[in-house]
């Protein structure tokens, strides 16, 4: 079956702009998690959605937001971009249980100039 | 707060040898501990997990050991192959549902 699909794969924005990233989970998976990966901070948890509800949230400012649709697809939005938001944003889907087994997409590489 | 840390940032091993990647964790309440592998340009890939009530679990060429007394987790890879070259992350699921915290990663280099 198809894996996790993230779009766009690469994008360049300037400071102050906003960006929306999209994630299509594996068919049948109801949980979608988002992570930010940078060389300095590693993989950091942003938030997790299950059946359109945010169940968990990491320690990121309110500029980072997300949502999940009824078909389990998810989007995350970053407003008022800062240089430090440059990162690889990874989406992961799962069945939604508590095992920690996540299936990751290849990520969206965001560069903020 | 919660933290998952790694002892070594880079590990070089000869092809065919066994590899051991170590990880320390601090949250005693974690239910699951997981190992992920990330190859260049790809997202992390699940390798194996272990529940907190176990101390050992084996997969294909991989074994995970959990020592709750010293809060230590290790991943053993048997007969390491060039395709095993990647960054390995330990992770824990302690927040319920799918709030997974990742360690800083160990880069495994396999020498042919």
Image (cartoon, coloured by chain):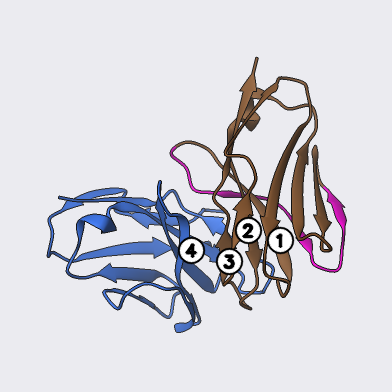
Residue B45 sits inside the magenta stretch: yes
Q: Chain of mark 2?
A: B
- Tell me whether the residue at label 1 lies in contact with that at label 2, contact meaning CB atoms closer than 8 angstroms: yes
- Label 3 – label 2 distance at C-alpha: 6 Å
Q: Is residue A60 above or below residue B58?
A: below
Mark drawn on residue A111 = none
Q: Residue beneath label 3, please?
A: B100
Report the Cα–Cα distance between label 2 and label 4: 21 Å
Q: Chain of mark 1?
A: B
Q: Quadrant of the N terminus of chain B?
A: bottom right
Letter of the brown chain = B
Q: CA distance from mark 3 to mark 1?
A: 9 Å
Circles 3 and 1: CB distance less than 8 Å? Answer: no
**Residue ID for mark 2:** B91
> Pointer 4 and pointer 1: residues touching (CB < 8 Å)?
no
Q: Are marks 3 and 1 on the same chain?
A: yes
Measured as percent of width and height from the top left, residue B68 is found at 82, 63
Task: Tell whether label 2 touches label 3 (CB within 8 Å).
Answer: yes
Numbered disc 3: what chain?
A: B
Q: Which residue is mark 4?
A: A25
Q: Identify the element where label 3 is drawn.
A: strand
| Magenta residue span | B41-58
Q: Which chain is blue?
A: A
The chain letter for the residue carrying disc 4 is: A
In the image, are marks 2 and 4 on the same chain? no
Residue placed under numbered mark 1 in the picture: B33
How far apart are the alpha carbons under marks 4 and 3? 17 Å
Q: Position of residue A50 (x, y in %)?
A: 51, 79
Quick one: label 1 or label 2, which is nearer the N terminus?
Answer: 1
Identified at 64% across, 18% down, the residue is B111
User: Where does the C terminus of chain B fall, quadrant-wise?
Assistant: top right
């Amino acid at each position: 079956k198809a894996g996790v699909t993230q779009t766009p794969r690469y994008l360049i924005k300037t400071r102050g702009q906003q960006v929306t990233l999209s994630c299509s989970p594996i068919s049948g998976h109801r949980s979608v998690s988002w992570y930010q990966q940078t060389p300095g901070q590693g993989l950091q948890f942003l938030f997790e959605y299950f059946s359109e509800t945010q169940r968990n949230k990491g320690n990121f400012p309110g500029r980072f937001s997300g949502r999940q649709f009824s078909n389990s697809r998810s989007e995350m939005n970053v407003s008022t971009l800062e240089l430090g938001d440059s990162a690889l944003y990874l989406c992961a889907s799962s069945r939604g249980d508590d095992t920690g087994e996540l299936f990751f997409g290849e990520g969206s590489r965001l560069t903020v100039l | 707060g919660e933290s998952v840390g790694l002892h070594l940032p880079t590990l070089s091993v000869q092809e065919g040898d066994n590899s051991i990647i170590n990880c320390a964790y601090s949250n005693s309440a974690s239910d699951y501990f997981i190992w992920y592998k990330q190859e260049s340009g790809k997202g992390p890939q699940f390798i194996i997990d272990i529940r907190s009530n176990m101390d050992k679990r084996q997969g294909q060429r991989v074994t995970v050991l959990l020592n709750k007394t010293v809060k230590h987790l290790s991943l053993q890879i048997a007969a390491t192959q060039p395709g095993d070259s990647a960054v390995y992350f330990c992770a824990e699921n302690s927040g319920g549902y799918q709030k997974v915290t990742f360690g800083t990663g160990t880069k495994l280099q396999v020498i042919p």
